[in-house]
Amino acid sequence: MVSELSDQLLPFQLERSGLRGRLVRLGPVVDTILSRHDYPDQVARLVGEFVVLGASLAGGLKFAGSFSLQARGDGPVPLVLTDVTNDGDIRAYAEAKEGAADKDARLDQLMGAGYLAVTVDQSAVGGQTYQGIVELEGESLTDCMLTYFRRSEQVPTGMRVAVTRGEEGWRGGALVIQKLPETDPHAAEDAREDWQRTMLLLATLGEEELADPRLSEEQLLVRLFHEEGVRVFPRHDLAVGCRCSRRRIDKMLATFSAEDLDDMADETTNEIGVTCHWCNKTFTVDRDDFREP
């Protein structure tokens, strides 16, 4: 019997090398996010990759606010954006032009030339905002992120990402391992060998295995790294978390002029329809609610 993926992030450590990583497995979360939009399959798969990878990268940071991955390009998919709060709430969406369904699933074919931005936004709690930007280079999101860590963060990073669609819906996974700076220069050679061995093992992880709901997170890690010794840490729950609300819609509409509101309103019902681009939910608002007394 096939079970659902757990919608969780599992931090772990490889005891032999001391390397740490995060494993994200998503079932209902990624299926809900993708099913709310009528994306072509290759666009949905790309958005799903942003979701699982964004969740795994956010899980390696300490922040109060949101972590986001945003890519902009000049191709038929000019925008893909996902963000994850420190509580594990995830949302994502993409803009797709006509012709996106005719392109291959590769990132460079879908998005063209552009950039990838990694942002940690803590402004809502009075904290700082950090952002790194790298050009969209390579055939996949993984290629771009590896370039980002190599150039911007200078952190050796290995990752595998998978998003698949079966009878039970969309599911996905991401496994990220990063190498911390060396504190003992005499151990550099051993650390280099540990890293190379781990990356060879990581390369054997297939997409179907990474997103397979029949494998628990622990089973997957032990199957992959059984000779390394796997130590897991407490899990973190992940959930769909759009932040739209009627209050936010009213606040947004209040910024428009009376003429603009009149143009937005339906001539027959006098109602304004506002659709959230994140979750695709439509709010219906009476135009008269915004008339000055």
Image (tube, helix red, strand yellow):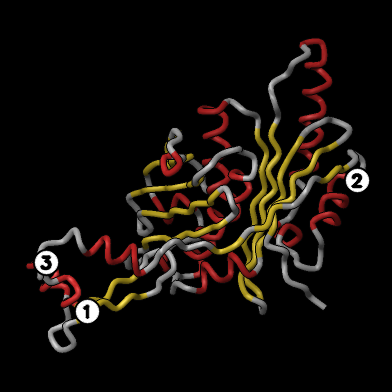
Near mark 3 (Cα within 10 A), the count class, few <14, some 14-19 or many ≥20, is few
- Side (left or right) of 28 relative to 18: left
Vertical side of 27 occupied by 182: above or below: above
Q: Nearer the viewer, residue 170 or 103?
A: 170
- Side (left or right) of 175 relative to 38: right
Q: Position of residue 95 (x, y in %)?
A: 37, 61
Q: Residue at x 57, y 47 (%)?
A: 86
The mark found on residue 286 in the picture is 1
Near mark 1 (Cα within 10 A), the count class, few <14, some 14-19 or many ≥20, is some
The mark found on residue 260 in the picture is 3
The mark found on residue 226 in the picture is 2
Q: Position of residue 69 (x, y in %)?
A: 48, 47
The mark found on residue 86 in the picture is none
Q: Residue at x 49, y 46 (%)?
A: 66
Asked whether residue 48 appears in the rendered view, the answer is yes
Q: Secondary structure at mark 2?
A: loop
Distance between the alpha carbons at the discs numbered 1 and 2: 61 Å
Furthest residue in direction left, as rendered: 259
| Quadrant, the N terminus | bottom right
| Quadrant, the C terminus | bottom left
Circles 2, 3 touching at the beta carbon (< 8 Å): no
